[in-house]
Image: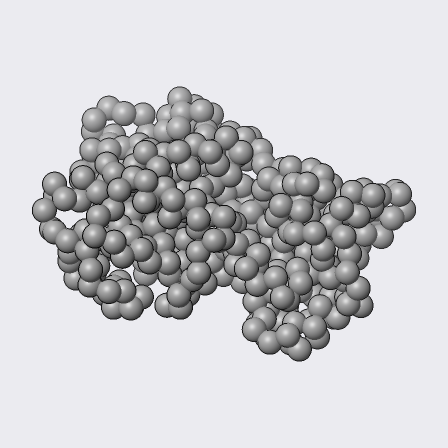
């Protein structure tokens, strides 16, 4: 266990009293699950969640102690900028914390687990370091006594099981989804980007159905009232989890670690995830020619997929022409490297630590260069880490596969010096 956890957390953590605790010591305590709590003491929502989490942790620890094993530990991954604030926050918490000085590891954890907002709680298996549940905050809300510990993922068919609705009031069992590709659509009427996506998605749904492909969408509402749900659902030709079934809606959010809406998860006929980027795919492929949207190793940067730049470090190769041939050649150059990285991390059941893009010449690319203060040179090889506000730049006359591979390897080995964005 110590090896896998140390790879994620480092060798030591800090206790509330300031004492160091060896990560290796967690095994002796019987810890089988670790919750990574991303938060900040200055945040109102974090303070509120922190109180609930402390009560949950206290109950769970008390029951575990009576059973002779700790089972669960929580580690605070702070967003504090000042060490004194961090010290005060840690003293007030009953669990362990990542050392304040280990800022590079903190950023790596935010990127590794694609944390986009706080508070956030991610449970990982202490023996393997793999993610067990991406939305731990829903766990402590839905299972306050910890009866479902260790909250591991279940098959989609099991989580969605039960009646589903059509907007005409018809009900059918979730077994009707068997053998179909499924889009699990997390959305709400109060959210303007959701309503915009829904209008496009309605047309995409109809086009796919007209081709005879087996495809269904299941709407998982985040509306604030049943009336809002009904009004919004009336615009949709697909299925929905009943609004009153809050437990099932919450379990689906937990299953896919939903941190924001709109989100469209596309599943294959077996219920396995094809892509979590259904929103981007639908907007990029309005004719649905590439359905069911298997992920591409290298993407051409567009207005609709630029949002992915905020999800973690991204390699972006800027080219000097709007000519499709130039962009295609650039994609072919970096694709083998991207495929190798993706395959390596997929074998470990982890998301790749980099996304790969090619950027041509257009207004959006110009804005990105301006925002990140990049030179006008092209070709220009960069890695952009928006969450860390850092960039890594290689400005050479010719970009070769060897140069790209060395650049990526050095980045992953923490050998590159970042420049501020």
Q: Position of residue 154 (x, y in %)?
A: 58, 33
In this rendering, the answer to whether 55 lies above or below 162 is below
Horizontal arrangement in the rendering, residue 403 relative to residue 87 (left or right): left
Q: Quadrant of the C terminus?
A: bottom left
Taking the spot 33% from the left edge, 44% from the top edge, the residue there is 404
In this rendering, the answer to whether 116 lies above or below 198 is below
Q: Is residue 36 visible?
A: yes
Taking the spot 58% from the left edge, 42% from the top edge, the residue there is 131
Horizontal arrangement in the rendering, residue 12 relative to residue 315 (left or right): right
Q: Quadrant of the N terminus?
A: top right
Residue placed most toward the observer, 81 or 411: 411
In this rendering, the answer to whether 124 lies above or below 340 is below
Q: Quadrant of residue 362?
A: bottom left
Scheme of colours in the image: one colour
Q: Is residue 225 visible?
A: no
Taking the spot 32% from the left edge, 45% from the top edge, the residue there is 403
Residue placed most toward the observer, 268 or 82: 82
Horizontal arrangement in the rendering, residue 165 relative to residue 17 (left or right): left
Taking the spot 58% from the left edge, 71% from the top edge, the residue there is 80
Q: Residue furthest left?
A: 323
Residue placed most toward the observer, 61 or 172: 61
């Amino acid at each position: 266990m110590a090896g896998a956890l140390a790879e994620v957390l480092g060798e030591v953590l800090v206790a509330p009293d300031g004492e160091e605790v060896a990560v290796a010591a967690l095994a002796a305590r019987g810890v089988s699950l670790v919750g990574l709590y991303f938060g900040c003491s200055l945040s109102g929502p974090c303070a509120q969640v922190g109180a609930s989490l402390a009560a949950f942790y206290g109950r769970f620890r008390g029951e575990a102690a009576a059973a002779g094993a700790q089972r669960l530990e929580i580690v605070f991954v702070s967003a504090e900028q000042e060490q004194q604030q961090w010290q005060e926050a840690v003293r007030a918490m009953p669990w362990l914390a990542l050392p304040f000085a280990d800022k590079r590891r903190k950023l790596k954890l935010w990127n590794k687990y694609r944390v986009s907002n706080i508070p956030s709680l991610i449970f990982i298996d202490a023996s393997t370091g793999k993610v067990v549940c991406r939305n731990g905050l829903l766990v402590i809300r839905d299972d306050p006594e910890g009866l479902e510990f260790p909250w591991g993922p279940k098959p989609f068919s099991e989580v969605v099981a039960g009646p589903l609705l059509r907007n005409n009031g018809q009900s059918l069992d979730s077994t009707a989804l068997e053998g179909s590709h499924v889009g699990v659509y997390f959305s709400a009427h109060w959210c303007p980007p959701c309503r915009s996506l829904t209008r496009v998605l309605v047309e995409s749904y109809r086009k796919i159905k007209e081709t005879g492909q087996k495809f269904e969408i299941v709407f998982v509402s985040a509306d604030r009232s049943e009336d809002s749900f009904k009004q919004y659902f009336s615009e949709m030709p697909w299925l929905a989890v009943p609004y009153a079934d809050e437990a099932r809606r919450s379990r689906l959010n937990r299953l896919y670690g939903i941190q924001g809406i709109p989100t469209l998860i596309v599943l294959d006929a077996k219920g396995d995830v094809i892509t979590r980027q259904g929103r981007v795919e639908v907007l990029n492929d309005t004719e649905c020619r590439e359905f069911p949207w298997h992920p591409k190793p290298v993407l051409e940067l567009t207005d609709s997929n630029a949002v992915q730049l905020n999800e973690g470090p991204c390699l972006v190769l800027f080219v000097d022409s709007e000519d499709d041939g130039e962009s295609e050649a650039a994609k072919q150059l970096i694709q083998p490297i991207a495929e190798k990285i993706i395959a390596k991390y997929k074998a470990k059941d982890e998301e790749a630590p980099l996304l790969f893009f090619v950027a041509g010449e257009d207004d959006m690319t110009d804005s990105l260069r301006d925002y990140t203060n990049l030179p006008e040179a092209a070709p220009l090889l960069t890695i952009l880490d928006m969450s860390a506000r850092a960039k890594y730049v290689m400005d050479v006359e010719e970009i070769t596969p060897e140069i790209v591979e060395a650049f990526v390897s050095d980045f992953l080995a923490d050998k590159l010096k970042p420049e501020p964005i």
